[in-house]
Amino acid sequence: MEAFIGILNYAVFFAITAGIFAVLCLGLNIQWGYTGLFNIGIAGFYAVGAYTSALISGPPPGPMDWRVVGGFQLPWPVGFVGAALVSGLIAFIIGIPTLKLKEDYLAIATIGIAEVIRLIIKNESWLTNSVWGIKHITSPLALPIERGIRALLRANPGFPLWLQRLVSNGYNWFYLGMVVLILLLLYGVSEKMIRSPWGRVLRAIREDEIATSTAGKNIFWFKMQSLVFGAMIMGMAGSLYAHYARFIDAETFEPFFGTFLIWVMLIVGGSGNNLGAILGAFTIWGVWAGTEFLTHGWGLTGYRAASLRVISVGVILEFILLLRPRGILGEEKVVSFIFKKERR
């Protein structure tokens, strides 16, 4: 029973992490899957969301910190909304000079801004505490929930060990519920928007900009909306991560985890399909977590273990591209509820 509880507690941790990655995938799917915007600076928006939320809702600078700003200790929803707004604002600023140009310029701009953000995190210690990161970030409702758990365990010392371990992990169950709720809400909003006339314009822009512009659509403005909306979702994912991990630094938002892995998740799940984006996040993170057990079992450490995990993800990606080029689920051919009813 204790072994089962250990597996269950790990599954909760896994689901929280995969859920946060799924939120990132939803944001990328709006930009790339539906509009064709080549954003390879996901890690930058992810980091902006995390640091914005940490500065708004996190603790004030400690006596050993270099940071002199932030720590307003506002409620987490304020930090969550602030993370989305700041990420969206940065996307808007990037989009002004680039969205009227070819797609390559947006890719260059996004990877450039992501690198600038990473360097700011590392060097502007007055704002980010540099490589020491921001510590002791408060989690939403953590204090009352953890107090309740401790009181319950003190009042019932006769609980079996497996039940104590399960109850002790109560806050993670709460956080998982919150992540799942936010993921479902974002999925529902994304589906509504994509199946609306607005979403059909995005798909038309992706397929043929010239034909869409001749229909009287403002290509630049629709692209801007897609870029900003996707970046705001990425900022929300950053907020969720920061308040779950309770510690962030520059290493957290390296391009491999913050950008490359998200692209793999979306491609594997199915670009242009919101459900596929979520499925891809859980699938690839499952492969990544599974290879960790393999490396321990085979006694691999250091760069050998890391190499095996990267190779495993690469092999999975190759198989998916060969067997299902559109991803596991692939894009729906018809997204309008009206056309679906007519077909019936």
Image (tube, helix red, strand yellow):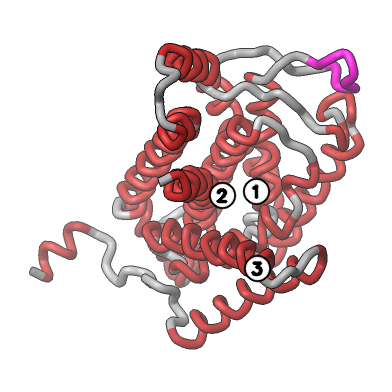
Indicate which disc residue 95 carries: 1
In the depicted structure, whether residue 85 falls above or below residue 216 = above
Q: The residue tagged with tag 2: helix, strand or loop? A: helix
According to the picture, the residue beneath numbered tag 2 turns out to be: 227
- Nearest to the observer: residue 208 or residue 17: 17
Gap in angstroms between the C-alphas marked 3 and 2: 43 Å
Tell me if residue 67 is in the magenta stretch: yes
Indicate which disc residue 297 carries: 3
Tell me if residue 20 is in the magenta stretch: no
What's the residue type where badge 3 is placed?
Gly
Between marks 3 and 2 in the image, the one whose residue lies nearer the viewer = 3
What's the residue type where badge 2 is placed?
Leu
Mark 1 surroundings: few (<14), some (14-19) or many (≥20) residues within 10 A = many
Q: The residue tagged with tag 1: helix, strand or loop? A: helix
- Horizontal and vertical percent for residue 112? 79, 54
Asked whether residue 27 appears in the rendered view, the answer is no
Which of the marked residues, 3 or 2, is nearer the chain's N terminus?
A: 2
> Would you say 263 lies left or right of 144 here?
right
Query: Residue shown at 61%/72% (left/top)?
Result: 313
Q: Quadrant of residue 330?
A: bottom left
- Nearest to the observer: residue 291 or residue 265: 291
In the depicted structure, whether residue 325 falls above or below residue 242 = below
- Nearest to the observer: residue 260 or residue 15: 15
Stretch of the chain drawn in magenta = 61-68
Which of the marked residues, 2 or 1, is nearer the chain's N terminus?
A: 1
What's the residue type where badge 1 is placed?
Gly
Q: Quadrant of residue 5?
A: top left
- Horizontal and vertical percent for residue 228? 56, 43
- Nearest to the observer: residue 31 or residue 182: 182
